[in-house]
Image (cartoon, helix red, strand yellow):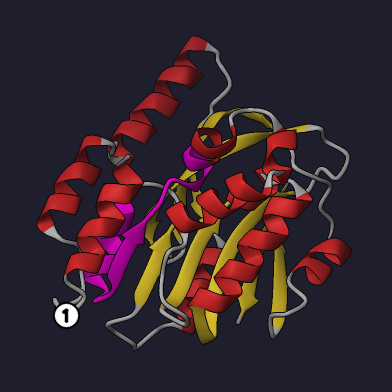
């Protein structure tokens, strides 16, 4: 599995300068599509009359995430968008060390499509070991994107407990949640960083929602963390910045 290979490469030599091992970058490149390709795809959809499923827009949440770590280099950042070359290059150019996981794809590998499987303790333990096997307080930032909204309550709580343990105090987490509170199924997206306040969003398909999310239960969900801040977007997404 790509995520296992990436993580094993990173752990083999934690003494190297900030960045990603060249082998990891090459693997990531096989799974990447440039921002230019996204723009072309969106243009083709418009010409054919199809709904445009790809767009580039500003993100207040992303802007806040990078504003909070400005003027600092050598941080360890976990990006859960997968082995995404655009994101890897952007974070490395800022001087940070990058860990990559495709958390949505890894959900399917660990649990299949059945949300009831996400209550299985042994499967939950396997998922956490595969995706968050980091030392205590090892991460300075986590880009979760929209992955949390596809987790059942049992898995979601276990994931946030693990994240709380592997994130350093005063580190930041960025997550997206649909603002349609009664939806049983919601779109899954891929996210590519264009700059420190701009993202390219592409739909990956429709998935069952793990539970209903609103501001109140999100505040409760991140209750162990120091603070939670919300931004509502035109895609009906809540961008959530959480301070550890």
Query: Where is residue 54 drawn, in percent x and y?
Result: 49, 34
Q: Is residue 55 visible?
A: no
Residue placed most toward the observer, 189 or 61: 189
* Residue located beneath label 1 in the image: 15
Relative placement, left or right, of 35 versus 56 is: left
Q: Observer-nearest residue: 14 or 150?
A: 14
Residue drawn 63% across and 28% down?
Answer: 113
Write down the region rendered in magenta. 83-106
Say which residue appears at 41% left-offset and 79% top-offset: 138
Residue sitting at 50 percent across and 75 percent down?
A: 166
Is residue 100 highlighted in magenta? yes
Residue shown at the point (79%, 64%) measured from the top left: 218
Residue 161 located within the stretch drawn in magenta = no
Measured as percent of width and height from the top left, residue 157 is found at 72, 61
* 199 left or right of 11 in image: right
Residue 146, percent from left and from top: 60, 49
| Residue found at the far top of this picture | 48
Q: Is residue 13 left or right of residue 201?
A: left
Q: Secondary structure at mark 1?
A: loop
Residue 127 position (above or below residue 134): above
């Amino acid at each position: 599995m790509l995520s296992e290979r990436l993580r094993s490469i990173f752990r083999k030599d934690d003494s190297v300068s900030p960045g990603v091992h060249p082998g990891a970058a090459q693997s990531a490149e096989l799974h990447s599509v440039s921002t230019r390709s996204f723009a072309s795809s969106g243009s083709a959809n418009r010409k054919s009359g199809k709904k445009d499923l790809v767009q580039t827009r500003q993100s207040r949440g992303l802007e806040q995430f990078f504003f909070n770590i400005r003027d600092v280099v050598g941080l360890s950042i976990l990006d859960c968008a997968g082995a995404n070359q655009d994101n890897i290059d952007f974070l490395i150019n800022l001087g940070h060390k990058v860990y990559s996981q495709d958390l949505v794809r890894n959900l399917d590998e660990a649990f299949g499509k059945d949300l009831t499987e996400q209550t299985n303790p042994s499967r939950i333990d396997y998922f956490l070991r595969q995706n968050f096997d980091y030392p205590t307080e090892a991460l300075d930032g986590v880009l979760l994107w929209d992955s949390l909204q596809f987790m059942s309550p049992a898995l979601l709580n276990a994931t946030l407990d693990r994240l709380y343990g592997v994130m350093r105090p005063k580190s930041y987490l960025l997550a997206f949640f649909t603002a349609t509170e009664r939806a049983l199924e919601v779109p899954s997206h891929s996210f590519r960083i264009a700059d420190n306040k701009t993202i390219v969003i592409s739909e990956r398909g429709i998935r069952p929602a793990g539970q209903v999310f609103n501001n109140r239960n999100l505040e409760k969900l991140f209750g162990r963390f120091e603070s939670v801040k919300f931004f509502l977007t035109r895609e009906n997404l809540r961008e959530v910045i959480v301070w550890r």
